[in-house]
Image (cartoon, helix red, strand yellow):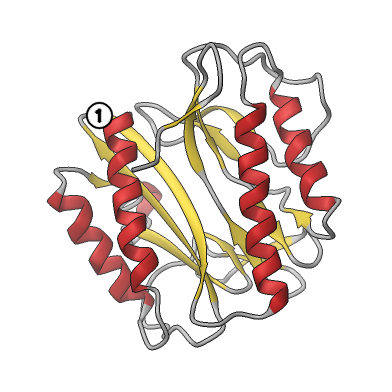
């Protein structure tokens, strides 16, 4: 899983630098497909439940599962780039949200808070903690800063399959849920809205939108529970 995670991190590093004004989201998908294949891996997403692309590109009010295509990125947009890769039978999964050119103050704060929520979650992923402790920490961090966490979609266990148990909500109560044990591998993924937490599904059947039209951001890492701090697997 470390090697699969490294592929994901390498692809995200490339995509982060390619998300510029005038770039089509479909072009980013093509770049990702080439980068994943060049490293001997394959996309976790392409063909998954008939998903038609290699990555997810969610722009502005799109929360997750945005489908790359002909959309042209504009100065001031934010775009979430979600990449999954399979290498030698193991999965890696991570996401970042980046600004396209100069973004608004609100968008900048949203990106900072969402990334901070992920870092908070990683720090709480220690052997002996309950999963509810992680979920509660994410929710508390986000809501104290004036934003909201998406509730209909969650993080997940990961290993040989992209989505495994347990589900990891971005809200919850401390002291509840499964006990974290050494060797567990989890995909933590705070999804944070600038407005309310409710979402709706686009007519394409995939893309999740904020119900109030506000901005949304998404950061994700695959981590392993150890005897100490969690090991982040989707890093360079």
Check disc 1 and report the residue beneath it.
89
The residue positioned 39% from the left and 48% from the top of the image is 49
Please tell me whether residue 45 is drawn above or below residue 121 in the rendered image.
below
Q: Is residue 153 left or right of residue 177?
A: left
The residue positioned 24% from the left and 66% from the top of the image is 31
Give the x, y percent position of residue 17.
35, 69
Secondary structure state at the residue bearing disc 1: loop
Q: In this view, does 123 lie to the left or right of 232?
A: right
Give the x, y percent position of residue 48.
36, 48
Q: Quadrant of the N terminus?
A: top left
How many numbered badges does the structure rendering display?
A: 1
The residue positioned 46% from the left and 14% from the top of the image is 183
Give the x, y percent position of residue 229.
56, 22
User: Is residue 214 something one can see in this rendering?
Assistant: no
Q: Which of 102 and 15 is in front in this view?
A: 102
User: Is residue 164 something one can see in this rendering?
Assistant: yes
């Amino acid at each position: 899983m470390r090697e699969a995670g490294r592929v994901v991190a390498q692809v995200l590093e490339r995509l982060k630098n390619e998300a510029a004004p005038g770039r089509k989201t479909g072009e980013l998908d093509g770049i990702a497909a080439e980068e994943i294949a060049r490293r001997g891996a394959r996309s976790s997403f392409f063909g998954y439940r008939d998903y038609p692309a290699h990555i997810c590109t969610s722009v502005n009010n799109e929360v997750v599962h945005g489908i790359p295509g002909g959309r042209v990125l504009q100065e001031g947009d934010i775009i979430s780039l979600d990449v999954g890769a399979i290498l030698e039978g193991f999965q890696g999964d991570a996401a970042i949200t980046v600004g396209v050119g100069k973004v608004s103050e609100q968008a900048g704060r949203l990106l900072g808070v969402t990334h901070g929520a992920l870092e908070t979650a990683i720090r709480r992923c220690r052997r002996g903690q309950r999963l509810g402790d992680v979920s509660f920490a994410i929710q508390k961090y986000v809501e104290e800063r004036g934003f909201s966490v998406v509730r209909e979609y969650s993080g997940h266990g990961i290993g040989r399959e992209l989505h495994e148990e347990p589900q990891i909500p971005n809200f919850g109560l401390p002291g509840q849920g499964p006990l974290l044990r050494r060797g567990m591998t989890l995909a933590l993924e705070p999804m944070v809205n600038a407005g309310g937490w409710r979402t709706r599904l686009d007519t394409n059947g995939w893309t999740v939108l904020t119900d109030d039209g506000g901005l949304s951001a998404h950061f994700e890492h695959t981590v392993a529970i150890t005897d100490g701090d969690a090991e982040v697997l989707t890093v360079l």
